[in-house]
Image (cartoon, coloured by chain):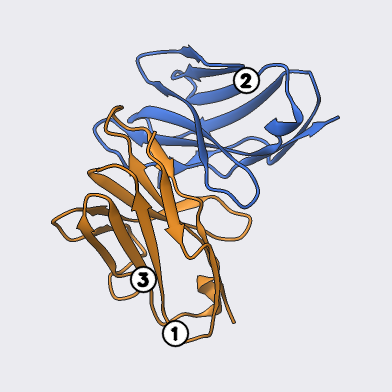
Chain colours: A orange, B blue
Amino acid sequence: SAVISQKPSRDICQRGTSLTIQCQVDSQVTMMFWYRQQPGQSLTLIATANQGSEATYESGFVIDKFPISRPNLTFSTLTVSNLSPEDSSIYLCSVEDRGSSLEQYFGPGTRLTVT
Amino acid sequence: GESVGLHLPTLSVQEGDNSIINCAYSNSASDYFIWYKQESGKGPQFIIDIRSNMDKRQGQRVTVLLNKTVKHLSLQIAATQPGDSAVYFCAEAPFGNEKLTFGTGTRLTIIP
């Protein structure tokens, strides 16, 4: 399975600022996904990021708040803009394993706290 | 909307016993199901998956059972160990769709 790293692993940010999270994969992958996991809750898909096209956002998530870049097949960034305390969550990227049709593997997550 | 849910939020099992974690889903178009394990401070870890054309699949100490008639999924962990303590999520995707919908999670605690 792919090895996925995320930076930063955690951060504390002030209200109104932005945080950009990086996701790096050790192999080329077509599909990359960004999820949010609010404290003590399950995972919610934010958007799907394919290389060479704009990200596809799920209901309740908009590009202005969560801009995503996917410059190549091994890297993606998620920015959480205009932070508020409600954005305090764990943000996770995942990739689809090319060797298996739908298996998704997750990075370790970025824990964001907004003060 | 469609949802994937779990019957029990917490489960405590004696070390060495078997555990069963249940999951109900409501989307009749669900075709692919995955179980993930999430330890504290880590991302979800893939455990096992199953497609809708199967009703059982086994891995190392784990078995996933799928009952499409009642839209029910279960994860059985045999001979539990302290390292099995974690939150377990089921997730599903409809046919031809890679977007996963996650259940609410069950916290499994293994009692030494």
Mark 3 surroundings: few (<14), some (14-19) or many (≥20) residues within 10 A = some
Pick out the residue farthest to the left. A52
Name the residue type under label 3.
Thr
- Label for residue B13? none
Q: Amino acid at mark 2?
A: Gln
Residue identified by numbered label 1: A17
Which label is found at residue B76? Answer: 2
Relative depth, front residue between A56 and B24? A56
* Same-subunit check for callouts 1 and 2: no
Q: Is residue B66 left or right of residue A40?
A: left
Closer to viewer: mark 3 or mark 2: 3
C-alpha gap between disc 1 and disc 2: 45 Å
**Tag 3 subunit:** A
Q: Element at badge 3?
A: strand
- In the picture, residue A3 is in which quadrant? top left
The residue at the point 35 percent across, 74 percent down is: A65
Choose top left, top right, bottom left or bottom right for residue B19: top right
Badge 2: how crowded within 10 Å, few (<14), some, or many (20+)? Answer: some
Inter-mark Cα distance, 3 to 2? 38 Å
Query: What label does residue A79 carry, if any?
Result: 3
**Residue at the front extreme of this rendering:** A26
Dot 1 lies on which element?
A: loop
Question: Mark 2 — on which chain does it sit?
Answer: B
| Residue A97, x across and y down, in percent | 32, 35
Residue A8 placement (x, y as % from top left)? 48, 65
Q: What type is the residue that disc 1 sits on? A: Thr
Q: Is residue A25 above or below residue A59?
A: above
Q: Secondary structure at mark 2?
A: strand
Both marks 3 and 2 on one chain: no
| Pick the front one: B83 or A82 | B83
Residue plotted at (38% across, 78% down): A81
